[in-house]
Amino acid sequence: MYMYFFIALLLFTAPISASTQNEGQSVGQSNRPSNARHEKKVTPPAAPKAPESKDYEPTIQYNQPHYEDAHKPTKQSHDAIDLLNALSTAVVGVFTVVLAFVAYRQYIATRTAERAWVVCQAPDPLPTHTGGNVAIRWVVENKGRTPAWMTSLGSAARIIKAGDDLPATPPYTMAGPFTREGTVLPPKAKASRGVDIPDANMAAVEHGYQGQDYFLYVFGIVGYRDIFGSTHETRYCFRFKTGPTTADPAPRDFYVDGPPSYNRAT
């Protein structure tokens, strides 16, 4: 009886065992290719090499920045030298301009100090008029350090009523003619000038005429050339004052007066 039961159990379990074995084999076979495919996807032959090459690139990258850093100081030094050269050039240029300006000013100052200066001395005060014509005399003098060559010389006198004006253009009576080169007037030398005032005109200046006051003006001009070849002109004008008054206490004498066109020097 047990024998029959054991045989029946073997017959029942045999198909189950076979089925289980077949399923295990199929599962093993199905798992084996998937593991192979998994290994190919996760660890491909080329995949590790790319990161490895990048991992070994730091040596090249290290050398490259080191190469650039080695050249940076050189470029910076060149920039510093260029900047220094530019600043030096600018300083030299400014210094040259200043030096030229100073030299020019010194040249002008030297010419001004050394050139001829022809000026006029005021006439001497006139004595009180007692009748007769009056001669008025004055001189022009070279006050400079070098000679002057006079090329023109003129003088005149004019008596006008108080409140009137002198002519806009001075009416000079010119002397000469002078030569083209002019007449030399050494330093400290003088040239005399003068006019004669008729008796009646001088009486009007001294005492007035028909209740009107009259003023006497004497004026002149000198044209000359200096040793540097520059031409100059001196104009002068004086008014005669007969004596002190309540409004003007200045004594009897000649005083600088007249419009600007009568008084200037170049």
Image: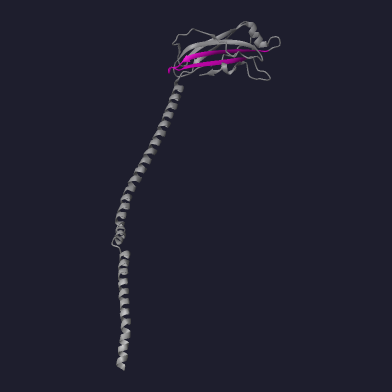
Residue stretch rendered in magenta on the structure: 213-240
Q: Residue 169's quadrant in the figure?
A: top right
Q: Position of residue 167 (x, y in %)?
A: 60, 13
Q: Give the position of the N terminus as an image quadrant.
A: bottom left
Q: Position of residue 2 (x, y in %)?
A: 31, 93
Q: Residue 208's quadrant in the figure?
A: top right
The answer to whether residue 84 is above or below residue 259 is: below
Residue 202 seen in the figure: yes
Of residues 140 and 230, which is closer to you in this image? 230
Q: Residue at x 47, y 12 (%)?
A: 150
Q: Residue at x 31, y 66 (%)?
A: 37
Residue 121 seen in the figure: no
Q: Is residue 162 left or right of residue 14?
A: right
Of residues 75 and 119, which is closer to you in this image? 75
Q: How many marks?
A: 0
Q: Residue at x 66, y 9 (%)?
A: 204
Q: Is residue 158 left or right of residue 65?
A: right
Q: Position of residue 74 (x, y in %)?
A: 32, 46
The answer to whether residue 5 is above or below residue 206 is: below
Task: Give the prevailing secondary structure in the magenta stretch.
Answer: strand
Of residues 255 and 95, which is closer to you in this image? 95
